[in-house]
Image (spheres, rainbow, N blue to C red):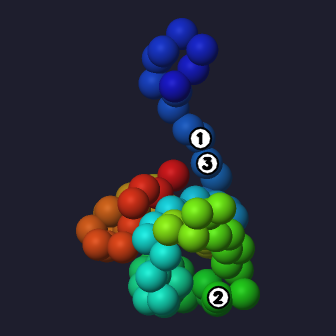
Amino acid sequence: MDRFGQQADLVLEFPCHFPIKVAGKADPDFHNQVCAIAQKHDTTFTPDNLQAKQSSTGKFQSVTLNIQATSKEQIDAIYQDLKNCELVVWAL
């Protein structure tokens, strides 16, 4: 959204690097599931491309996936799979 509350159109030139922030439950399988989703849609993704942080309470963790985006459809599909993952709280 822009400063007037209007939806701003994002213009991307593909292929491009695209970061996706994901927060989820502090479950040992969270990292593996998020990596599997990223690898499903970006065959160049490796866990080395993942930056992780633990919440101060230890209940949640967040990661930043740095993917190689090839299309808007690919990005939409990643977000949909992340949304469907029971361990994911949100993805931006």
Can you tell which of label 2 and label 1 is closer to the viewer?
Answer: 2
Mark 3 or mark 2, earlier in chain: 3
Residue 2 shows up from this direction? yes
Residue at 64% across, 70% down: 54
Mark 2 or mark 1, earlier in chain: 1
Amino acid beneath label 3: Leu
Q: Position of residue 85 (x, y in %)?
A: 31, 73
Give the residue number, with chain letter if any, for mark 2.
Answer: 47
Estimate the spatial distance between the alpha carbons at disc 3 and disc 2, rounded to whole Å.
24 Å
Q: Position of residue 76 (x, y in %)?
A: 39, 59
Give the residue number, with chain letter if any, for mark 1.
Answer: 11
At label 1, counting other C-alpha atoms closer than 10 Å, the crowd grade (few under 14, some 14-19, many 20 or more) is: few
Residue 64 shows up from this direction? no
Residue at 51% across, 52% down: 92
Q: Is residue 84 left or right of residue 73?
A: left
Q: Nearer the viewer, residue 15 or 61?
A: 61
